[in-house]
Image: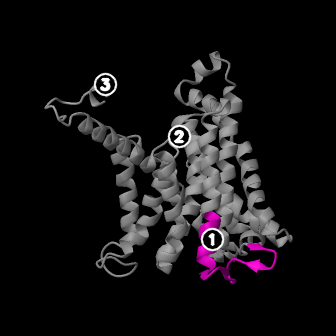
Amino acid sequence: MRAARLMALTGVALVLPFVLSAAWLTTAVFVLVAAIAVTGLNVLTGYAGQISLGHAFFLAAGAYGAVALADAGLPSPFWIPAAGVIAAAFGALAGPLALRLSGLYLALVTLGLVFLGQHVLFNVASLSGGPEGREFPAVSVGSFDFAQDTLAIGPLLVEGNGLYYYLAAALLAATTLYARNLIRTRPGRAMVAVRERPAAAAVMGVDVARTKVVAFVVSSFFAGVSGALYASYVGFAQPGHWDVMLSIQYVAAIVVGGMGSVAGPLLGAVVIFALPSLLRELPFLGETGSGFSASELATIIYGFLIVAFLVAEPRGLVGIGERIRRAGTRMRASVPSSTGGVLTTKEERR
């Protein structure tokens, strides 16, 4: 049954670029790219229990690290993963902060990374283009440019948006598979132990310091790849984009989707990063005019969703899905049998 569902979801994902409008396909690309970074934050916060409000810093590190390597002549098959390595190096430097701080104090320190990164980007024009921003190169493989060329697959033509969609989907699939397998390994179980009881984990032989640093490195790597892919897709970015609000969006995504779960990052990314596009479809909202704009209303909804899910369902949409599944199981178990009885056990159902 699980394999059948996976095949069905894969089939839907493959045909989406051919059924979505250009605007919604662009939104789908943003969701997939963001889900890569949300998966990274889920490893840090959901698995290891380390609170971070500095995810935007690592996204920016990946984006501007990638453009520096592209300017140096490296092709995109190298600078995309290299962007993750650059961000992971910053994560390794930030990781030791978690050894002395936790909770609110760690969140405030990682928040400071965002302000530090923005100060550098606004003032180092050779790297970021200054406050006006700069262009970013498109992904290319050899002479094939994702932004300008079209790929023909039989009678089907895949243009730039579709090419980025499939690239982001492939990277997200690899990221999700890694996160799914990580939780089953010894380092993954060590992260969960550190999240639950750091002192007890240390007594059981877990290297708490190493585990926290590894969580920061893995999370930062995925953020760097996501940042590089995002900047390449939009083609232009200003330093002001990588701000605190961006970090809060990623926190909202793991809370809404479900911290510590495999499917949570994608579900959270769909809700959080597709929400502004959905709100713009409402006839009484717009980026201009009286009242709330779509982006302003989305910001309000982010805050409401964080509070609502933390209070009502800390496991997010994944938790709600499990509640529905359990309720369905109980309803099926209580259906009267053909003999007039009530099926309540496996033996009776047989």
N-term-proximal mark, 2 vs 3 = 2
Q: Residue furthest front?
A: 339
* Residue 202 falls in image quadrant: top right
Residue at 36%, 59% (x, y): give it. 301
Query: Above or below — where is 77 with respect to 330?
Result: below
Query: Above or below — where is 29 with respect to 339?
Result: below
Asked if the residue under mark 3 is in contact with the one under mark 1, i.e. CB atoms within 8 Å, the reply is no
**Residue 153 highlighted magenta (yes or no):** yes
* Residue 76 falls in image quadrant: bottom right
The residues colored magenta run: 140-168
N-term-proximal mark, 1 vs 2 = 2
Amino acid on which the number 1 mark rests in the picture = Tyr
Query: Above or below — where is 179 with respect to 103?
Result: below
Q: Which residue is mark 2?
A: 46
- Camera-nearest residue between 20 and 310: 20
Mark toward the viewer: 1 or 3: 3
Q: Which residue is mark 1?
A: 164
N-term-proximal mark, 1 vs 3 = 1
* Residue 157 falls in image quadrant: bottom right
Locate residue 165 relative to residue 294 in the image: left or right.
Answer: right
Label number found at residue 347 = 3
Asked if the residue under mark 3 is in contact with the one under mark 2, i.e. CB atoms within 8 Å, the reply is no
